[in-house]
Image (tube, rainbow, N blue to C red):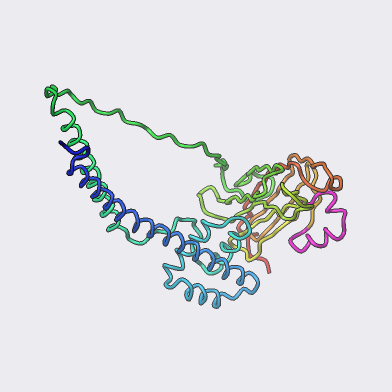
Amino acid sequence: MRPIVPTNILIAIVVALVIGVGIGLPLGWFTVSFNFSETAQTHLVQVVADSFILSPNADKANARLTAFLGSDDKVKIGISTAICKTSGTDQARIKQMAAILNIPTTCEPTPPPDNTLWLALCGGGLVILVLGGGGAYFIMKRGAASSKPKPQPTAVGRAPAVSSGSGASTVVSQPTGGPIAEAGEEPVSTFKTTYMLGDDLFDESFSIDDQQGNFLGECGVVIGETVGVGDPKKVTAFEVWLFDKSDIRTVTKVLMSEHAFRDEGSKNKLASKGDPVLGKSGEMLEMETAALKVQARVVDMQYGSGALPPNSFFQQITLEISAWKKPESAAAPTA
């Protein structure tokens, strides 16, 4: 009596399992260890950047980066990795330190170690799995059809190609005219962002580039202070910031609710983060650095209601942020 599953099929299944485990375990270990390395690099770079902002000492910062990361190439990779994995004021501090230390600040994915051997092993394993599975399937079909007449061969058509779709993305257009230098002319960059109650992770940042694509700086808005308890967070103030790669400073304005602005305790507490500004529709925040000028306009806003004091937190707010590049003669760093 023939066995239910032929011996050769059992052998093929066992071989396929052994190969799958042999490839999957090392590949999983490689992926986890590589991601951990990126996380560690980002943390170390962030620590050095925070220390540098408090005490700007280029020699000490270079020494720490070299001690933590190694060679100049590894320092460059570590800085790029940290920029890619951070945002808002954290990212701005890293870019500010990198600009002063003359380290490129382009956000590029960290190149992994040379994994040609891994790819070859994985590719070979997949080929073996496909061949083994196909052989097992062929043997099973042959055994099942052994008592039937051999079917006539049929033509095999080519499978149609399948195109993969791409997700929608938001594109921020930039002017393409002549040099933008003076107020009143078109800005080099314009952005619009909206906060809605419930967006507890609201943190927007935008790159400021000139018409040639050169990086000039960055600006953004992030939750600065909340009020009350419970979810969702009740935002009573936002930090609107500007980073200029040619200036050592990061300029910040604090856009406050009416309740926070009128309360001296809250106002004094938030003043340590930046100049306080009362939030209201049409309000214009102006920030200026050595080479850039930014205006953030409150397009529309609405306060939330509930058990908290009136006009104490934002239900919704929309900001339009425009950036100009100053004339070269006026772009010298300020003391």
- Residue 329 is at least partly visible in this image: no
Q: Which residue shows up at 63% across the image and 69% down it?
A: 53
Q: Position of residue 229 (x, y in %)?
A: 77, 52
Q: Residue furthest front?
A: 1
* Viewer-nearest residue: 98 or 38: 38
309 left or right, relative to 165: right
Check residue 124 for magenta coloring: no
Say left or right for 98 vs 322.
left
Q: What span is colored magenta in the figure? A: 255-275
Query: In this image, 324 relative to 121: left or right?
Result: right
**92 relative to 201, above or below:** below
Residue 212 vertical placement versus 30 (above, below): above
Q: Position of residue 291 (x, y in %)?
A: 63, 58
Q: Is residue 10 left or right of residue 290?
A: left
Residue 63, how many percent across, how many down?
Answer: 51, 77
| Residue drawn at point x = 56 percent, y = 57 percent | 86
Predominant secondary structure, magenta span:
helix
In the rendering, at what x and y percent does residue 285 appear?
74, 50
